[in-house]
Amino acid sequence: MTSRERFEACGESGEREEGLDLQAYLSRLEYTGPLTPTVELLETLVARHMATIPFEAIDVMLGQGVALNPAIMDRKMLDEGRGGYCFEHASLFGRTLRRLGYRVEPLLARVWVHRDPKDGVPAASHAALNVQAGDRLWLVDVGFGGMMPNVPLAWRLDEPQQTVFGDFRLVRSDDGYMVETARDDLWMPLYEILDFRWKSVDFDVANHYVAEHPDSHFRHDLVVARTEEETRYTLSGNRFRITRRGNVIEERLLDAHELGDVLGRHFGLSLRAEWQPMLERVAAKGDR
């Protein structure tokens, strides 16, 4: 079954729709323009979402887990000004798009980037969206941290798509579709979208694994990212980096105080007292 055939067959997904305050979401994005569900609006919302709502999994590092309850996610990401990781971003953005009139299919994927093939097949641990806008389908991913572009990717197989963050393409794989990016004239796999009609319970299971399993790197590593226009801000452990069009313009290692400052200054996250011990551990661990 092709991506379009599966998309047409799935109808409306089983994702839970309750809890969305559309005006609160648009206010968070500082967007006041037209809301007709066009390709242009989709492109604008993807860019604004990634510029204003950071990728972060601080709650996972603190052992608090992540609940895929719409009311809880919306309170966290809209009312409290927090970010989230892939499952939270995909839920919030997908529910917003449906409210605006887009057809949306949730996707689950296996993350292959930086993975040694000798370690075997990874579990499905990433969420993205398949969106219909205009006369085509688009891969929309606002929650993959600092590795995806801030534009939708057209579902055109084997065709490189140029963005300010490099070239990307989708190719057929054994179990679905591989999303790849070009690095040094080679295509590097990012993640494999699994060709299946997923339901909410599948995302609950995958989210539980990523948030709770001791082998999940989000349990041990601080990862924060925000993408604004042509600039990417990333925090990996205590290494802070700013890149513009793929070129590193600033990179430094931070102590605990600087980590808190950067979280506020570059990611819009107000430092909480309960985060301080975690930031001290991150700074002490260093760039290992």
Image (spheres, rainbow, N blue to C red):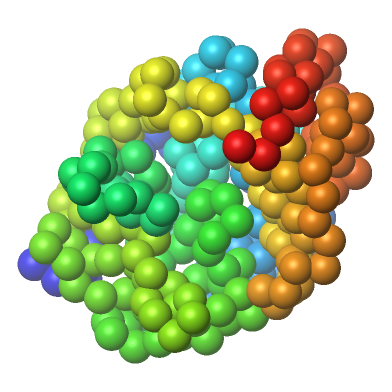
Q: Quadrant of residue 249?
A: bottom right
Q: Position of residue 83 (x, y in %)?
A: 67, 37
Q: Position of residue 244 (x, y in %)?
A: 75, 72
Q: How many marks?
A: 0
Left or right of 171, for residue 283:
right
Q: Nearer the viewer, residue 175 or 48?
A: 175
At x 67%, y 26%, the residue is 285
At x 47%, y 32%, the residue is 217
Q: Position of residue 236 (x, y in %)?
A: 65, 43
At x 75%, y 55%, the residue is 241
Q: Is residue 27 above or below residue 228?
A: above
Left or right of 260, for residue 194:
left
Q: Quadrant of the C terminus?
A: top right
At x 61%, y 67%, the residue is 150
Left or right of 259, for residue 20:
left
Q: Is residue 213 visible?
A: yes
Q: Position of residue 173 (x, y in %)?
A: 17, 67
* Direction left: furthest residue: 1
Q: Is residue 185 above or below residue 143?
A: below
Q: Is residue 187 above or below residue 213?
A: below
Left or right of 237, for residue 122:
left
Q: Nearer the viewer, residue 35 or 60?
A: 60
Q: Is residue 36 visible?
A: no
Q: Quadrant of the N terminus?
A: bottom left
* Direction front: furthest residue: 288
